[in-house]
Amino acid sequence: MGNGAPGSVSTAARGGAALLRLAANKALLVALVYLLLGMVWILWSDRVVEALFEDAAQLTRAQTWKGWLYVAATAVLLYAVLYRLLRDEATHRLRQQRQREDLDLLNQFRESIIDNANIWLNVLDAQARITVWNKAAEQISGYRREEVIGGDAVWEWLYPDPDYRADIARRVRAILDEGAEVEGFETRIRCKDGQVKTMAWNQRRFFDERGQVGSIAIGQDITERKRLQDELERMAVHDPLTGLYNRREFELLAARRFADCVEAGHPYSLLWVDIDEFKAVNDRFGHQVGDEVLCGVAGVLQAVVAGQGIAARYGGDELVVALPGIVLPEACALGEVVRQRVQAARLLADCDAGTALTVSIGAAQRDAAMHDLMALASAADAAMYRAKAGGRNRVCGPA
């Protein structure tokens, strides 16, 4: 695949040499025909003139007029031949000039399109050096074409991590050496101002008219699109107020870990957290304060169980934490830490210094009779209600 273009160049050279040989052969043939016709004319015309004129003076004049006639005839013939040749040459030159003008216009148009395109366009030579760097590439990366044309230092600037840069370099070499193509390939680049942007690339190899290899890359800045996509994905699995997992995602993740623990025979505990007198907080201080309180409790919960459990807002003011691999005493201990930190946080201090916000927490551990996550959740929920019935602000396990 890499040798196709050089071979075509050699074929073109051989074809040009053959045309030159054909032209030389045609010219030689015309010269021989002219020589033969001249010899026939001279011999035939001399005999005719000698037969017609016996007087020496008349014969001399006839020979002279015969010579002038031959010169005139050959002059007319030469004029016709030269006129045709020169006309063809003039037409050919005019065609070449028009082709050059058209090519110049095409190059100007191409350069204008490339330079003013709103997508990143760059061209590499066989050594992965930049040969074309359009305005969009300058605007996105921050590097001017004068800084990058003719060199390869820009790869170190765009991809400062050596391992990441080596992976990119392998892909570029596969394009240049093997003709591989990439479409929609995403990379992260570091711009001149330090920003990190996400680019989507389409890149392929090409051969120029001299058979030299290169590649053209088209890049699109998809940083904002990726950010929005990540945000949508995050919103799909997280509660928008607290940032914890939402109920749907919690049930998926926690149920999967529950099945793993059942299969492996590992313990599995769950905490059910409810904010005490939360309705009264909303009624007295307003829903904005209620939201701030809910976020404060969620922050404490996430900080305590980070790396150990799966925390979620299950609904309203109820928060839940799945604790795979953790036995009930450890789960109760974590619940107690949460309870103490919520109380110490004084989340209502700005509204009423005398009102302490507390939580009631129920804890339960999977046993042989619990075949799914919902059974464990029901046990923890029941334990939470016992905590409330026992005076609130406490952690209770199974009855």
Image (spheres, rainbow, N blue to C red):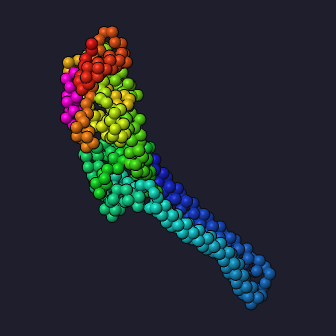
Q: Residue at x 51, y 59 (%)?
A: 17
Tell how many labels.
0
Q: Residue at x 42, y 46 (%)?
A: 225
Where residue 348 appears, as percent x and y from the top left, is 26, 39
Residue 329 in the image: above or below residue 102: above
Residue 238 vertical placement versus 132 (above, below)? above
What secondary structure predominates along the stretch shown in magenta?
helix
| Residue 229 image position (x, y, % from top left) | 41, 42
Residue at point 41%, 40% (across, down): 232
For residue 11, side relative to residue 285 (left or right):
right
Is residue 314 part of the magenta span, yes or no? no
Residue 169 appears anywhere in the view: yes
Is the N terminus in the top left, top right, bottom left or bottom right quadrant? top left
The answer to which quarter of the image holds residue 36 is bottom right
The residue at the point 33 percent across, 9 percent down is 369
Q: Nearer the viewer, residue 263 or 302?
A: 302
Spot occupied by residue 107 in the image (x, y as percentages of width and height): 49, 64
Seen from the viewer's position, the closer of residues 125 and 15 is: 125
Say if 352 sits above or below 113 in the image: above
Query: x, y (%) of residue 301?
Result: 26, 31
Provide the residue span drawn in magenta: 331-346
The quadrant of the picture occupied by the C terminus is: top left
Residue 342 counted in the magenta span: yes
